[in-house]
Image (tube, rainbow, N blue to C red):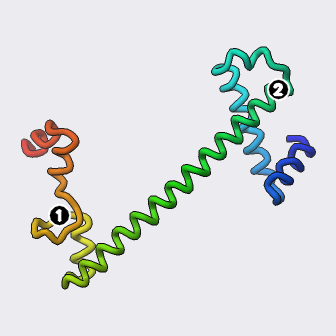
Amino acid sequence: MKDRCIEAVQTTLNRPITKAEAQGIEDRIRKNMRFAALDDPAYASMGPAQQLTEAAKRAGDELKQEAALKRRRVIQTIQAHDRIENYLLDARAEGLDGIEALKRTLVNVADGKSNTLSQPRDVRLTNPWLVREAWAL
């Protein structure tokens, strides 16, 4: 990657980038140039500068999508953690000890205090054939 390109990226990010980051950006742009050549018939008629700009735009969009996915996964992790923590607190309030409550998050106990469905019911909801096969074993 050229020095002026590295400086432009650093200016945009408002921080210095490492050699590994610069190499990763360059690799991502190269990959997007190859994919654009396969996906977009108009790409071949563009000049080299336009091709590079298009590939860089695609690489930027790809980075934004990856960042959004990472944020979504962090949110889902926090929500799952909160669901389990709230269940454990509620279970303790109902008189279950921590280990018993945690066990009930993994295995359904048919007394109405668990927060999970039984595995055979989950399987039935997805594929009845699997239940027949499981019971046959």
- For the N terminus, give its image quadrant: top right
* Quadrant in the picture for residue 100: bottom left
Q: Badge 2 local density, few (<14 within 10 Å), some, or many (20+)? A: few
| Mark 2 lies on residue | 50
Q: Could you tell me the amino acid type at mark 1?
A: Asn
CA separation in Å, label 1 and label 2: 59 Å
| In front of the other: 87 or 18 | 87
| Mark 1 lies on residue | 108
For residue 82, above or below residue 135? below
Residue 42's tag is none
Image location (x, y in percent) of residue 124: 16, 44
Q: What element carries label 1?
A: loop
For residue 97, above or below residue 42? below
* Residue plotted at (56% across, 54% down): 70
Q: In this view, does 93 lie to the left or right of 20?
A: left
Image location (x, y in percent) of residue 84: 34, 70
Q: Could you tell me the amino acid type at mark 2?
A: Gln
* Residue plotted at (69% across, 35% down): 58
Q: What element carries label 2?
A: helix
* Quadrant in the picture for residue 116: bottom left
* Quadrant in the picture for residue 119: bottom left
* Residue plotted at (23% across, 71% down): 103
Image location (x, y in percent) of residue 38: 65, 20
Q: Badge 1 local density, few (<14 within 10 Å), some, or many (20+)? A: some
